[in-house]
Amino acid sequence: MRFTSLDAMRGAAALSVVVFHALFSIEGGEALVKPLDYTFFDPWTALLLPLRPFWMGAEAVILFFVLSGLVLTLPVFRQGLPSYPAYVVKRFCRLFLPAASAVLLSIALLAVVGTEPAAWPMPMLDLLWREQPSIDLVLQHLLLLSDGKPDEFYVLDLPLWTLEVEWRISLLLPFLALLARRSDVALLAVAASGMLLPPAEQRLLGTETLSSLRYLPVFAFGVLLAKHLDAALRRITALSSAARLALWLLCILLIYARVLLPAPAVQAHHRLLIGIGAALLIALILASGRAQRALGVRPLQWLGRVSFSLYLLHMPIMLAAARLLPDAVTPVWRIAIGIGLSLVLAEVFHRLVEKPSMQAGRTLSAWAEARRARPAPAYSAGD
């Protein structure tokens, strides 16, 4: 069962990540974002607070994770547990093949533009493409194997850190769904335990190989929503208009957790609150015909279709555009051109890379499923 409104939501979130990175990449643009994170009582905050959804960073990533928890486990609750090898093969093709293509594109662009930084300061983008990549670095990117700090490692294409988290936890999702079928409390207990393991590992061993598990509760919220989706939608639609409005306000407050509870970095309580808010947002949209019609417009549907490609490509494209365009082009226009090129090339990448990757996943998973279902050959006593 496919919800086109959720595709549009994913597309809008991907575009907001692009704008978020663009703002951080323009001198002075960082001030448009940071007051919302760290200085809640700054005058800029009151003015820009309603515009926050247009440049979500951590909030958009957490929404992606909740959506993954929902869409990857909904079939388990409605159709039963699929073949695990087929599931893994399909997931591998869906994530690794487009990611590898994006890495190779980034390497090619880096070879063209070189490692020399742009003529104007780019506070965020100048942290990337500082040197030609080594073979080890390329292999680690292609295999989505960071050094325990995925959000600080992927210098060729920064958004890949979220794919590492997505890949590792998606391997656990079928089992989390089975656990949720037995008990919601058991699922939440396992998710909470997973969240506590990374800091314990870091303190006891000094390593961070389990760092992805800090996002386990966020995926678990999507799993719980998948389990209770029909009941949740019935209850929301049965509410009065005032009660639904109150839920929308609560949803906004939860998603704005980083604004209301400022800190220098995203903390565990931010992830939990934003994750609950994202799950509530999904439920509210699916229960609202008006919201689904708004998300059903063609531009948002197209954006949802190419959202993964846009998410993978925008950083390399913006970096290349910033360094290749003539000096006469202002920084703002360089970033704007980079975003425009990212949108155009996302369609090309979707057709040439993402769709074939999904088809390869379907083909290989069907083969794995057929191989699993094939009966063993019979042997006679003489054999």
Image: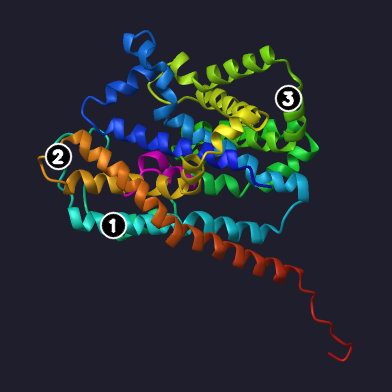
- Residue in view at x 55 percent, y 35 percent: 295
- Residue in view at x 68 percent, y 34 percent: 225
Residue 273's quadrant in the figure? top right
Q: Is residue 25 left or right of residue 311?
A: left
Mark 3: secondary structure: helix
Q: Outermost residue, right direction?
A: 381
Q: Is residue 58 visible?
A: yes
Residue 327's quadrant in the figure? top left
User: Where does residue 230 sit, x and y in percent of width and height?
Assistant: 76, 34
Circles 3 and 1: CB atoms closer than 8 Å: no
Give the residue pinned by disc 1.
Answer: 107
Mark 1: secondary structure: helix
Give the residue pinned by disc 3.
Answer: 237
> Which range of residues does the magenta coloring cover?
149-164
Q: Amino acid at mark 2?
A: Val
Give the residue pinned by disc 2.
Answer: 329
Q: Amino acid at mark 3?
A: Thr
Circles 2 and 1: CB atoms closer than 8 Å: no
Q: Is residue 201 left or right of residue 371?
A: left
Q: Residues within 10 Å of mark 3 (few under 14, many from 20)?
A: some
User: Where does residue 146 sit, x and y in percent of width and height?
Assistant: 41, 48
User: Where does residue 76 sit, x and y in percent of width and height?
Assistant: 73, 48
Q: CA distance from mark 2 to mark 1?
A: 24 Å
Above or below, 32 relative to 246: below
- Residue in view at x 27 percent, y 55 percent: 133
Q: Is residue 149 visible?
A: no
Q: CA distance from mark 3 to mark 1?
A: 50 Å
Q: Out of 19 and 144, give the one closest to the viewer.
A: 19
